[in-house]
Amino acid sequence: MDIKIKIIDRDGVLHEIDAPTDMNMNLMEVVRSYELAPEGTIGICGGMAMCASCQCYVKSDHELPEKSDDEEAMLAEAFNVRENSRLGCQLHITEAMDGLEVELAPEEL
């Protein structure tokens, strides 16, 4: 089953996309598959919570899984972190995320 997710890219453009819940994808992989961020600027570590290139800001009121220690530690060192920051690679697509709205954090140079 697909769910709808709204993603605001780094240029401020809103994309409403379908994300599959049956492929064990995470938000970072969805962003890459729709090419919503230039190649090489997102998911640089391959989804291991070892970089913050997939940081996003959660704009909707969805109840998401707790941050892992690895995610907390990475966000503690990242730039442009906000109260609602999450690493996209740590958010696995589930039916509970239907209607989720996120904004990609600025690219870290």
Image (spheres, rainbow, N blue to C red):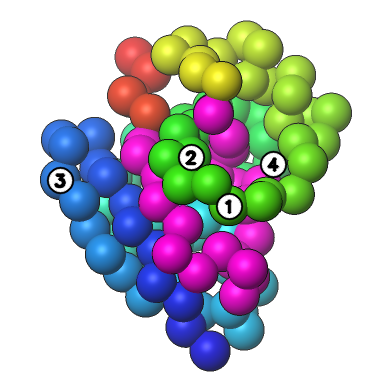
Q: Position of residue 98 (x, y in %)?
A: 50, 69
**What's under tag 1, amino acid-wise?**
His
Residue at disc 4, secondary structure: loop
Residue furthest bottom in the image: 1
Q: Position of residue 104 (x, y in %)?
A: 36, 37
Mark 3 highlights which residue? 13
Mark 4 highlights which residue? 48
Task: For label 4, count other residues whose C-alpha is less than 10 Å away and answer few (under 14), some (14-19) or many (20+).
Answer: few
Task: For label 1, count other residues whose C-alpha is less than 10 Å away and answer few (under 14), some (14-19) or many (20+).
Answer: few
Residue at disc 3, secondary structure: loop
Q: Earlier in the sequence, mark 3 or mark 2?
A: 3
Q: Earlier in the sequence, mark 2 or mark 4?
A: 4
Residue at disc 1, secondary structure: loop
Mark 2 highlights which residue? 58
**What's under tag 3, amino acid-wise?**
Val
State left or right for residue 87 relative to residue 106. Answer: right
State left or right for residue 105 relative to residue 65. Answer: left
**What's under tag 2, amino acid-wise?**
Val
Q: Is label 1 or label 3 in front?
A: 1
Mark linked to residue 94: none
Q: Is label 3 or label 2 in front?
A: 2
State left or right for residue 76 relative to residue 42. Answer: right
Residue at disc 2, secondary structure: strand
**What's under tag 4, amino acid-wise?**
Met
Q: Position of residue 23 (x, y in %)?
A: 60, 79
Distance Cα–Cα, label 3 vs label 4: 27 Å
Can residue 44 be spotted in the picture? no
Where are the magenta residues, as a range? 84-104
| Mark 1 in CB contact with mark 3 (< 8 angstroms) | no
